[in-house]
Image: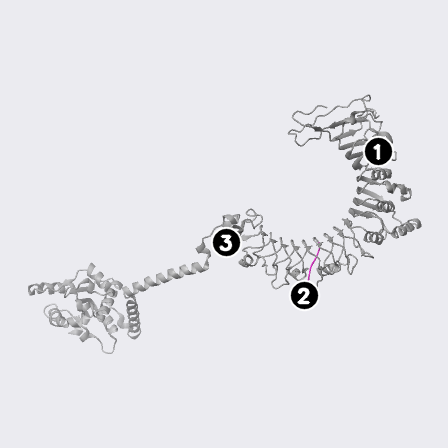
Amino acid sequence: MKRAKGSLRVTLQTVFWNTVYTDNGQQIEMGIPQLNSTFTKVHSYWLDSISRNVEQKTKPCFSTSVKNQENSEFGTMFHLEYLGLSATMIQRSDFRYITHLQLHTVFLTLQDFSRYDPQSLTALNTRSLHIVFAANQNFSFFLLFDGMSTSENLKISNIRYTLSYKDFPSPSLEFLKKIKTTALTFDNVDLQWGIIFQIFLLIWYSPVEYWTVKNLTFRGSVGKLTEYEYLFLLSFQEQPVHWGGSMKALTVEHARNKVYYFDQAILYRQFSEMNIENLTIYDAYMPHMLCPNRTSSFQYLNFSHNALTDELFQNCVTLTDLKSLILQRNKFKSLSKVSFMTSHMKSLKYLDMSSNLLQHDGAEEHCQWADSLADLDLSFNQLTESVFECLPVNIKILDLQNNQIASVPKGIAELKSLRELNLASNRLTDLPGCSAFPALAALNIEANSILTPSADFLQSCQRVGELQAGRNPFKCSCELRAFIRLEKQSGGKLSGWPEAYVCQYPEDLRGTQLKDFHLSELSCNTTLLLVAALLLTLVLVAVVAFLCVYFDALWYVRMIWQWTQTKRRAWHSYPKEQENILQFHAFISYSERDSLWVKNELIPNLEKGEGCVQLCQHERNFVPGKSIVENIINCIEKSYKSIFVLSPNFVQSEWCHYELYFAHHKLFSENSNSLILILLEPIPPYVIPARYHKLKALMAKRTYLEWPKERSKHALFWANLRAAISINLPMSFEANEE
């Protein structure tokens, strides 16, 4: 054989043989090596693998030779490990040319099988043998017997037998001594119960350590048991299966019982009394299992996907060596009964009760678990938060996913040994605290209803090294910043970050990953925000206070209040007198220190002579009994003009300020040009108080008359003043005056 280009060594791994027929349906005898008509032709074989240090695989295909080809072909296949055969008959001489090969696996397909010579398979030298029998033919049990004497690992598919169990070919006692098989697998088994029981007893007392039966169907007659059948069942029930035997593990998967009028307690008793370590009965519609009569050697029991109920193993004290118990996908309802079931299992470490109908009423039910239980799976049940009142105190791993837990109650009994807690797919609205779980290292709370994880978790669960909290409807707000900061500080503490952590609320942030969500410190820190707002308020208050003091705002407020009260009283007391009837040409406002000039100069020159002016002066026109403010307001409103005699003395007078304010108010309220300013003496700007900002504005914007010191200019001054206040008063008032 030529070595493949670029390779170091070529190893022939697999050879497949097939049967070839002529056009008339007859077999053609061809082969490598030359076999008889059972294996009529080596149709093809190929190189399946090359040494691992070869860079390129090659799969050269070799054509077959005809009958005269030499039989020494297999002599060169020293590295052949996997051999596939297909046959319709097997004779003792068929394997004479391959007995020297040290095979790993032989795959034997038997379609339309017609003949088997006992002891033929024993010529094979292989560790594993897989026989696929014809699916629609009665199985030849000699294949089973010889296969068990040939290889360590034996798998047989399609075991079907429609004949009576009375015809079952029981092997001799010498056969048990020749058995090599330690791992036996049956797939697609359809037999009568009698044959199954006989095979069971055969294998039980054989060296087989691991037996797996898949897709098993029990069959039997529809009628009642005959006397022979009944005696056979009794004898089977009395077999001491708990004695002897090398079996360590028995696995039965997908079993269907088609036997009618059959007491299943026989099966339960046989299974419960087995002296083996591992027993699996999966998907068998099994409604019950008996407690062993004596201390059992079971260490692993798997009764998943059955119909078991709360009555299983109640008050059972013989399963003291059991370490693992798997009861998922059954019909358990009461968690407290499950706990009492384990109370006598002193070695139990792992219990799987997932996919049941478990509930717990904490007010009425009590729990008593095995002290050794460390790993408990209660996922996919109907448990609420009351489950935390019914948990093993020494539990280390707890799975509660897919239940109806809305919160983790505070004040529950401490689970000091709990390291892993799975609460995924529940109804939690917040992260649980770890005050009751001081040793918690891994927590899963995915797919809950958590909007904003609280800061309590971050403080009480500092020892948690792995947190899975993705696929929650996070609300991206200030409360979430501490949770996001946890990932940045821990450096990988959040499992699934960042893909599984996405904002759900508010709408404008939906779909945003938490790593891309940012808010300023000021907008989220309430204390800092309050301090900033307080400082801003204080500054604003200080500014307002300064402006109020500078512009004497309180004084103006007080004046507005007095003016409002005066107007209100006048309206209620003399509503008819509120008509705007002018009685004076002008109201004079001056300081008492300037009264000599007013009395000696202003009044005589305006009230005497042609076109005399009627002046309102406080000394003669104020009404006794009324307040000064009320008199000022009345005089201003009854006068056409208001004359203000300005001087340094004027700005120092409080009452002059009142009169100026009310006159200015009339100026804007009536939109009139009623103010006349007479500057008696120059007023330096620094002398005018801050609250006289109106006076400053008036002096800056309005023309005022300045009293001349030269006597020659006095006549012009009075003429201008008379012209400024020139007005005809109403006739009624003038008539009354006369």
Q: CA distance from mark 3 to mark 2?
A: 39 Å
Compared with 342, 576 (above or below) is below
Three-letter amino acid code at the position of disc 1 = Ala
Three-letter amino acid code at the position of disc 3 = Arg
Q: Nearer the viewer, residue 674 or 56?
A: 56
Specify the quadrant of the image occupied by residue 155. Answer: top right
Q: Nearer the viewer, mark 2 or mark 1?
A: 1
Q: Which disc number belongs to residue 481?
A: 3
Q: CA distance from mark 2 to mark 1?
A: 70 Å
Q: Farthest top residue?
A: 68
* Mark 3 or 2, nearer chain start: 2
Q: CA distance from mark 3 to mark 1?
A: 74 Å
Q: Secondary structure at mark 3?
A: helix
Q: Nearer the viewer, residue 589 or 582?
A: 589
Say whether residue 145 is left or right of residue 589: right
Q: Which residues are magenta?
A: 356-364
Q: Are marks 3 and 2 in contact (CB under 8 Å)?
A: no
Q: Secondary structure at mark 1?
A: helix
* Mark 2 or 1, nearer chain start: 1
Q: Nearer the viewer, residue 315 or 319?
A: 319
> Which image quarter is the C terminus in?
bottom left
Is residue 61 at least partly visible in the picture?
Answer: yes
Three-letter amino acid code at the position of disc 2 = Ala
Q: Which residue is mark 1?
A: 123
* Mark 3 or 1, nearer chain start: 1
Q: Which disc number belongs to residue 475?
A: none
Q: Secondary structure at mark 2?
A: loop
Is residue 505 at least partly visible in the picture?
Answer: no
